[in-house]
Image: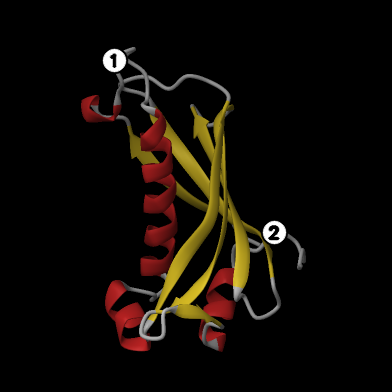
Amino acid sequence: MIDYIKRIEIRWSDLDPNFHLRHSAYYDFGAYSRISFMNEHGLTPQVLSHLHIGPIIFREECVFRKEIKFGDTITINLRVEKAKDDFSRWTMMHEIWKSRDILCAVITLDGAWMDTVKRKLTTPPDSFNEIFRVILKGSAKE
């Protein structure tokens, strides 16, 4: 497994009235990290559209640990925590770090793939497995 890390600078528009990162921004950054990973590994919106497949979310949970403020730079470490052998269902973990040594939040996401024409769950092509195995933690499987 290799780490997939995305760096983000906190903007004024990311803040809430208490001048720290608004709760929904954490979820936005998690989605940005996942979509960036997919895009950088060839699973672009055009490819997904052509294959009639897209990711869906069953559950998304964030545990907030430390405050993030304007001007902070954070990194998001993305990994697949567990997955079925065919990667039809999976759990992703996002660790949000400040200053590379302060764990500020952990987002856990359970998801699957949907056939966008039939509007039903589906198994992704084998090529998806190769891509997501890159960030699969150890050999954890369901």
* Residue 117, percent from left and from top: 36, 85
Q: Nearer the viewer, residue 79 or 125?
A: 125
- The N terminus is located in which quarter? bottom right
Q: Looking at the image, is 14 positioned above or below residue 91?
A: above
Furthest toward the top, the residue is: 18
**Vertical position of residue 119 compared to residue 132: above or below:** below
Identify the residue position indicated by label 2 in the image: 137
Left or right: 80, with 42 as reference point: right
Q: Residue at x 33, y 81 (%)?
A: 47
At label 2, the amino acid type is Lys
Foreground tag (1 vs 2):
1
- The quadrant where residue 85 appears: bottom right
Residue drawn at x 56%, y 83% is 123
- What secondary structure is found at the residue carrying circle 1? loop
Q: Residue furthest front?
A: 119
Which quadrant, please, contains the C terminus? bottom right
In this view, 114 is above or below 81: below
Q: Earlier in the sequence, mark 1 or mark 2?
A: 1
Counting other residues with Cα less than 10 Å from the Cα at mark 1, is it few (<14), some (14-19), or many (20 or more)? Answer: few
Label 1 is placed on what type of residue? Pro
Q: Nearer the viewer, residue 84 or 94?
A: 84
The way the protein has been coloured in the rendering is secondary structure
Can you identify the residue that label 1 sits on? 17
